[in-house]
Image (cartoon, rainbow, N blue to C red):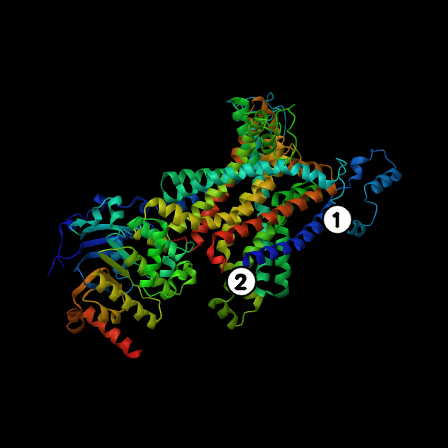
Amino acid sequence: MKRSAADATLDPAALPAAPPARRRRAPASWSLRIGAGLLLFYAGVALLSLVWTPYDPLAPGMGDGYLPPSREFLLGTDRLGADILSRLMAGARYDLGITLVAVAIALSIGSALGTIAGYFGGVVDTVISRLVEVFQAFPGLLFAMLIVQAVGPGVPNIILVLSFIGIPDYLRLARAEIRSRRAWPYAEAARMVGNTPWLVAFRHLLPNSAGPLLAFTSINAAFVALVTASLGFLGLGLDPNTPEWGSMIARGQDGVMTGEWWVSFFPGLAILGLTGAFYLLGDALSDLTDPRRRR
Amino acid sequence: MTVPLLRVDGLGGAFRRRDGGLTPVLHDVSFALQPGCITAVVGETGSGKSLTALTILGLQPSAFVRRSGRILFAGQDLLALPPSAMRAVRGRRISMVFQDARAALNPVFSVGAQLADVHRLQHGGSARAAWDAAVEALRRVRIPEAERRARQYPHEFSGGMAQRAMIAMAALVCTPALLILDEPTTGLDVTIQSDIMELIVELCRDRGLTACLITHDLGVVAESCEEVVVMNAGRVVETGTTEAIFTRPQQPYTRRLLAASRLDAAAA
Amino acid sequence: MALARMILQRLLWVLPVAFGVVTITFFAARVLGGDPTELYAPPEATDELRAQIRAQLGLADPLWKQYLAYLAALARFDFGTSFTTGESVGADLSARLPATLELGLVGLVIGILAGIPLGVLAAVNRERWPDFLVRGVTLSGMALPQFWIGLVLISIFFVQLRLLPGPVGRLPIGVAPPPPVTGFLLLDAAFAGDWVLWRMAAMQLVLPGVTLGLTTLATVARVTRAAMVEALQSDYIRTAIAMGHGRGMVWFRYGLRNALLPVVTLLGGVAGHIFGGAVLLESIFGWPGLGQYALQAIDHSDFAALQGFVLYASLLYVLAFLLVDILYLLIDPRMRA
């Protein structure tokens, strides 16, 4: 074949390479790194707060009330003179802990029920699906408020309520996943070699749905963290002195009106970091597990 | 030989992988399209034939990095044109028919509306006139009840009907000098395939269109094309007239391809 | 035809959902809830007095009798009487609905008008700085608690800059509302021709409306972006470009029209979210809407008010989804067949 003059320019650096292509891979791994990194950071802070915080997070009067951020109190003090940084650190235990446990419970129960409904179908499926639809007619936060008020205060109760309102979503997702995989050749193959239906459903089909389920779990965790903070903000379910971030924002609400913005401001940033980390991680996971988006 | 209408000259390039490395896919691809001829570019899946065709119109995937070559059309290098000038070439001078016509038409607009949009873009005029032109174009590609069909949506069309509409849009509503057809009959029933090819050949003859037919189906080529370009693994293996390629293939790859398609035809 | 049948089907489906919601809230509230008698009886009250109060509150009967009585009343659209306001719950809710709806609609409009263009901007500049910027904004909008955004906006625009009025409700303190026609202050003030009042009401709406709008915007922009990115990679967009269509046509007519389908689906959920969020938002801005009412009901174990509110919210939620389905049918020809 003929060689043209243009062939002389084979130096890749001299080429008008499309910039979008160059950065194609980067964002997914960025969100994974930032998301996972932030979560580890929060977990570390939560653990650290068990053994060390700059001041006692529960005790008032560490300094004067409403001290602005300074070298002594890095993020200032609240109305009662408690150190905000110490309270933020201790708060990681509540917000991160409640969220993780609630999500884990909802994921386990929801995906188990969803697997049963999706694999076996029939009456069980109909009953479960209808129930889910009714529960989904409740706006989540409202429902959480209602039951928290009903079952009474305490961290275990909050966790129970949060996992309870999460179950329908996991159930629906797991059910859809299992149904779409039930007829696949590998499920057929697993049945042919003599696995019981339960084994096929839980050992072969469910693990294959782990990707989408985990991606959703991460995004749902962000929502759960927000509801946790909202309950705290409304003073539902937790003692108002608890260093939970939402409760801290509520305590600073009066200060906002008189110019002491820092009391409410910093807990909001702490929430942003936690929920943002869950969102980023969820995005990264769905990019990794959705073959359509993995180009 | 006359001056070619379009000449692909030493086109080479690679796909950028997710890790940032390059996978070469086209190597020094060169061929020419003679005016008024139907030229087939044949090859197996992955031979780079569709990528080459898309590159002519600047529609290559963004991961494709061109490393060399020119595409000369009417004395201009298409690859060097600014985006606005390229837009003026698309549809007006060079137009294209795609493989899966039902997916290539917009699902939320009626087929007639899409043709009318293109008519107004290329020829101006009133919405009414554009609609009439769209219906007329559908009639010309022998879509029955064109008036009613124009108001329907792509999902209401069969694959063959959608491909007719696509051809009406690319070759009749647009009035190009060069028509590129990227696997226009793939995925259609055999009888529909030959109807569509008949239509394409007829339109090209009537309007003196130059066409470039991308296909892996040698049977189609023998019946309708004057020139053949054989591609394999991103390289042009052999070029020549249809008669020469079919009767005196020079390259072992071309011979294998021909043998395979004869077996295919014999089996069918 | 298909449309009419679908609407009918959906409306019929509302009944069992409403029944389920009523049943669940009733038993959740009664079985798990506190005893409101405690709130009304003095600590030294005798058992006799307590029983008397209980009977007055309608709590003396066995649970199933209370449930049946409640259902029977509901069938006559009687939501019961609130313990705290002493008014009929139906009247209470209807009186407060316009405040919540007015705020919700302002937030929704801001969210849609800003969210869709931002999503398109991000999608057509995929992996470039406008995209990263929009993604940063949407991530923050979704990750930040709405009540915190509200407080920060109050702190900036009211406390520090004094540009906008404080969080004291729908009108400045001491200002009388216009004669009620629709309950929407902006409309009622306009009907009354009182533009000074209209402006005051509008100014009060800015901060809560923007707060709600920011959260809505985040979700809308995110979904628009994802749908638009997918649309732009489609075969039909490639066709449109090959036929010579310019960017504007390709993005806004051929691309966006397809990308709007998932956005419309999302709106039902957003509407529900607005109701859920109303509880928090209204407590920040002193907004006298349904959310404040619900919060008060929760605080006082006001069963009738609570049940009425949850039922109201669920029905509005189901209604929002119905509207979305109809809208979807109108813009996607594939659904009409």
Have a look at marks 1 and 2 and say if they share a chain. no
Q: Out of B5 and C215, give the one closest to the viewer.
A: B5
Which residue ends up furthest to the left in the rendered image?
Answer: B1
Task: Estimate how packed mark 1 is, as few (under 14), some (14 to 19) or many (20 or more) residues with alpha carbons within 10 Å.
Answer: few
Place residue C103 in its image quadrant: top right
User: Secondary structure beneath disc 1?
Assistant: loop
- Image quarter (top left, top right, bottom left or bottom right) of the N terminus of chain C: bottom right
Q: Amino acid at mark 1?
A: Arg
Is residue C223 depicted above or below C39 in this figure?
below
Of the two numbered discs 1 and 2 in the rendering, the one whose residue sits closer to the viewer: 1
The chain identifier of the residue carrying mark 1 reads: C
Residue carrying label 2 = A179
Q: Quadrant of residue B10?
A: bottom left
Distance from label 1 to label 2 (Cα)? 42 Å
Element type at marker 2? helix
Q: Is residue C271 left or right of residue C46?
A: left
Q: Residue at x 26, y 44 (%)?
A: B84
Q: Position of residue A125 (x, y in %)?
A: 61, 62
Q: Which residue bears the numbered disc 1?
A: C76
Place of residue C245 in the rendered image (x, y in percent of width and height, measured from the top left): 32, 49
